[in-house]
C-alpha cells in the first residue's frame, strides 16, 4: 500500500478522534466514554439483538459485553433473552436509558453545531459534502466479499431479492424456469462459484460464475441491494469474479442481460465488456457481452 495514502488516513483519524472528543473518558461531558454512548444510540427505542448490535458496530463480543455490563450497572439498559428465541439475547433501554440517549442526542447536535459555527457558509457546505463522501467510502471499505454456498441463508436472501427485482423491472416479469439455469450445483466448486457481499453482517449483493472447461465461463446472478448502491459494489463484485475466473484459467467471460438493466449494461461496458452477437437463447436477453481475460488456460 502506498505510504502516503496510509499516512493520510492516519492523519485524518487523529484529527477526527480529537475533534469529536473520542479521546475523553467522559464523552460530551457525560459520565461515560464514546463507546458506551454509541451503544446507547445504536440500541435505540426499539431495542436490538446483541448479535446484531455487535455486527452493526463491528465490535469484539468480549468488548461489547463489557460495554453492556457497564450500562446495565448504571441502570440504562436491560439484557434479556429474546421473546422469539431464548438462545438470542436482546438489549433494551430502560426509562433512564431513553432519557440519557435523548440527552446525548441534544449534546451531539450542540457539538456538531460547534464544529460548524467558526466556518463560513461555503466552508460548512464543503465540510458536510466532504463528510458525506468520506462516509460513503468508509462504508464501501466495510463491505466484505467472499465465496458462499448457494444454500447459505445469506445467499438465499440475495437470490430471492435478485429474482424479485427482475420480476419488478422486466416488462414481462421474470420466471427462473424460462431462463438459462444457475442451479445450486452450477454455482458450487468446481462447477462454479457464488460470491456474497456483506455489510455489517447483512447480505447486500451477490454474483456467480459457471465454468465450462475450456469454453468461456458465464457470469450470472449479479445483484446489489438498493441500500448498497453507489458504493462501487457492482464493480467490485465483477472484478472479484474476474479474478476467480482468471485463477481457474478462464480466458473469456460471457454474460447476457436485459435492456431494463441500464445500469448493469453501463457497468459491463465500463469494465471492458464488448457487445457481441447472441451466443445463446436466453429468453430474457436483449444484449450479449464478452470479455477476454488473456493468459493461457492451465489444465489440471
Image: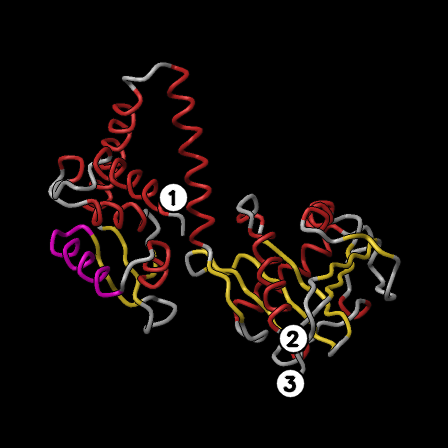
Q: Is residue 25 above or below residue 300?
A: above
Residue 22 image label: none
Q: Residue at x 88, y 57 (%)?
A: 277
Q: Which residue is mark 3?
A: 300
Give me the C-alpha separation between circle 3 and circle 1.
40 Å
**Main SS of the magenta segment?**
helix
Instruction: Please identify, in this view, whether the residue under mark 1 or under mark 2 is nearer the observer.
Output: 1
Dot 1 corresponds to which residue? 5
Instruction: State left or right for residue 168 relative to residue 106.
Output: right
User: Looking at the image, is 190 positioned above or below residue 220?
Assistant: below
Residue bounds of the magenta highlight: 61-76
What is the secondary structure assignment of the residue under circle 3?
loop
Q: Position of residue 107 (x, y in %)?
A: 22, 31
Q: In x, y percent, where is residue 197?
A: 52, 60
Q: Which residue is mark 2?
A: 192
Above or below: residue 50 compared with residue 25: below
Q: Quick one: SS at disc 2? A: strand
Amino acid at each position: 500500500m502506498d505510504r502516503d495514502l496510509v499516512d493520510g488516513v492516519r492523519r485524518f483519524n487523529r484529527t477526527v478522534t480529537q475533534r469529536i472528543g473520542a479521546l475523553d473518558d467522559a464523552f460530551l461531558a457525560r459520565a461515560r466514554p464514546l463507546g458506551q454512548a454509541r451503544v446507547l444510540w445504536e440500541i435505540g427505542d426499539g431495542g436490538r439483538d446483541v448479535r446484531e448490535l455487535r455486527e452493526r458496530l463491528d465490535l469484539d463480543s468480549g468488548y461489547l459485553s463489557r460495554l453492556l455490563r457497564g450500562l446495565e450497572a448504571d441502570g440504562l439498559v436491560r439484557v434479556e433473552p429474546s421473546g422469539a428465541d431464548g438462545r438470542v439475547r436482546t438489549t433494551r433501554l430502560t426509562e433512564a436509558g431513553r432519557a440519557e440517549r435523548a440527552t446525548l442526542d441534544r449534546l451531539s447536535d450542540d457539538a456538531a453545531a460547534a464544529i460548524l459555527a467558526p466556518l463560513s457558509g461555503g466552508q460548512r457546505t464543503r465540510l458536510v459534502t466532504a463528510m458525506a463522501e468520506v462516509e460513503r467510502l468508509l462504508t464501501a471499505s466495510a463491505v466484505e466479499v467472499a465465496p458462499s454456498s448457494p444454500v447459505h441463508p445469506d445467499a438465499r436472501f440475495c437470490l430471492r431479492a435478485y429474482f424479485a427485482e427482475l420480476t419488478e423491472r422486466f416488462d414481462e416479469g421474470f420466471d427462473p424456469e424460462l431462463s438459462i439455469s444457475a442451479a445450486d450445483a452450477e454455482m458450487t466448486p468446481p462447477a462454479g462459484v457464488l460470491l456474497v457481499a456483506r455489510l455489517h453482517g447483512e447480505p447486500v449483493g451477490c454474483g456467480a460464475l459457471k465454468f465450462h472447461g475450456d469454453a468461456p465461463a458465464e457470469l450470472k446472478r449479479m445483484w446489489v441491494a438498493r441500500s448498497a448502491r453507489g458504493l462501487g459494489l457492482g464493480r467490485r463484485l465483477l472484478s472479484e469474479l474476474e479474478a476467480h475466473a482468471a485463477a481457474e484459467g478462464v480466458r473469456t467471460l460471457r454474460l447476457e442481460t436485459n435492456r431494463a438493466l441500464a445500469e448493469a449494461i453501463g457497468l459491463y461496458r465500463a469494465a471492458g465488456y464488448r457487445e457481441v452477437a447472441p451466443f445463446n437463447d436466453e429468453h430474457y436477453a436483449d444484449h450479449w457481452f464478452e470479455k477476454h481475460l488473456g493468459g493461457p488456460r492451465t489444465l489440471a
